[in-house]
Image (cartoon, rainbow, N blue to C red):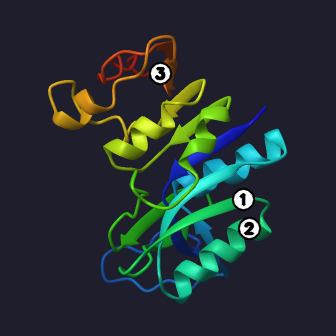
């Protein structure tokens, strides 16, 4: 199976803490690490583990953090194709408490690839599935060339009345999927209401 991800990356500094600090409190970390993360990067790494390989189309800041993100993602087994941006690489800080709960602070703008970026958009037409977390309307159109396109809820916020949604409708016969299921391609819409908690 050929898979790809079109998405974003945050360079994360993670601190293991007993609990998230209350306002004004100082807590000491029992450990820390740094790694590339974000919805696009995490999905691409997991898909590479499942499928044996994954093409990751992304945009990164043209700075040391962006270059380190690319190196680390390649070390994790991804084929990373990057559109370099003049902006600094987006970063984040994560408190991970003893119960495994994450609290995240993100710094900087989310960087996503654009359809006119010099990355191999044509290869998406050969993919069995593409997962999308970030990109402009032209990037979404390119991703829709795959047999199946899965978009994160955040990437699917647009409504059918917006120019972005109208410009990115699926071609006949393709399928889109999301966290709320797979269906024949339709204009972007909101997910069904969640079931009430038990």
Residue at the image point whose x is 16% and y is 32% from the top: 162
Q: Is residue 165 left or right of residue 53?
A: left
Q: Position of residue 61 (x, y in %)?
A: 45, 77
Q: Are marks 2 and 1 in contact (CB under 8 Å)?
A: yes
| Residue 126 versus residue 77 in the image, above or below | above
Marks 2 and 1, the one that precedes in the sequence: 2
Mark 3 touching mark 1, by CB under 8 A?
no
- Which residue is at a point 21% across and 24% down the rendered structure image? 160
Q: Can residue 97 be spotted in the picture?
A: no
Gap between marks 3 and 1, in whole Å? 28 Å
Q: Nearer the viewer, residue 114 or 34?
A: 114
Q: Report the residue marked by disc 3.
A: 180
Rendered location of residue 184, percent (x, y)? 47, 10
Question: Toward which corner of the image does residue 192 lie, by quadrant?
Answer: top left
Residue 61: image tag:
none
Between the residue at mark 2 and the residue at mark 1, the CA separation in whole angstroms equals 6 Å
Q: Secondary structure at mark 1?
A: strand
Tell me what residue is drawn at x 68 percent, y 51 percent.
55
User: What is the quadrant of the N terminus in the image?
Assistant: top right
Helix or strand or loop: what does disc 2 sit on?
Answer: helix
Q: Which mark is residue 79?
A: 1
Q: Residue drawn at (54%, 52%), measured in percent from left and top?
A: 40
How far from the left and from the top, in percent, is residue 22?
Answer: 36, 73
Q: Earlier in the sequence, mark 3 or mark 2?
A: 2
Q: Which residue is mark 2?
A: 74
Q: Residues within 10 Å of mark 3 (few under 14, many from 20)?
A: few
Query: Outermost residue toward the left?
Result: 161
Q: Residues within 10 Å of mark 1 (few under 14, many from 20)?
A: some
């Amino acid at each position: 199976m050929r898979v790809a991800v079109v998405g974003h990356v945050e360079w994360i500094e993670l601190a293991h803490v007993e609990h998230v600090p209350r306002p004004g409190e100082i807590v000491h970390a029992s450990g820390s690490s740094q790694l590339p993360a974000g919805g696009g990067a995490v999905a691409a790494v997991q898909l590479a583990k499942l499928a044996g390989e994954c093409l990751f189309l992304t945009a990164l800041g043209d700075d040391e953090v962006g270059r380190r993100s690319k190196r680390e993602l390649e070390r994790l087994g991804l084929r990373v194709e990057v559109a370099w941006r003049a902006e600094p690489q987006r970063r984040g800080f994560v408190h991970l408490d003893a119960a495994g709960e994450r609290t995240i602070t993100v710094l900087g703008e989310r960087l996503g690839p654009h359809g006119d970026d010099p990355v191999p958009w044509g290869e998406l037409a050969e993919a069995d599935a593409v997962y999308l977390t970030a990109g402009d309307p032209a990037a979404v159109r390119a991703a829709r060339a795959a047999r199946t396109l899965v978009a994160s809820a955040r990437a699917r916020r647009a409504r059918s009345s917006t120019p972005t949604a109208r410009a990115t409708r699926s071609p006949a016969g393709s399928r889109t999927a999301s966290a709320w299921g797979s269906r024949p391609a339709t204009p972007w819409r909101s997910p069904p209401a969640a079931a009430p908690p038990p």
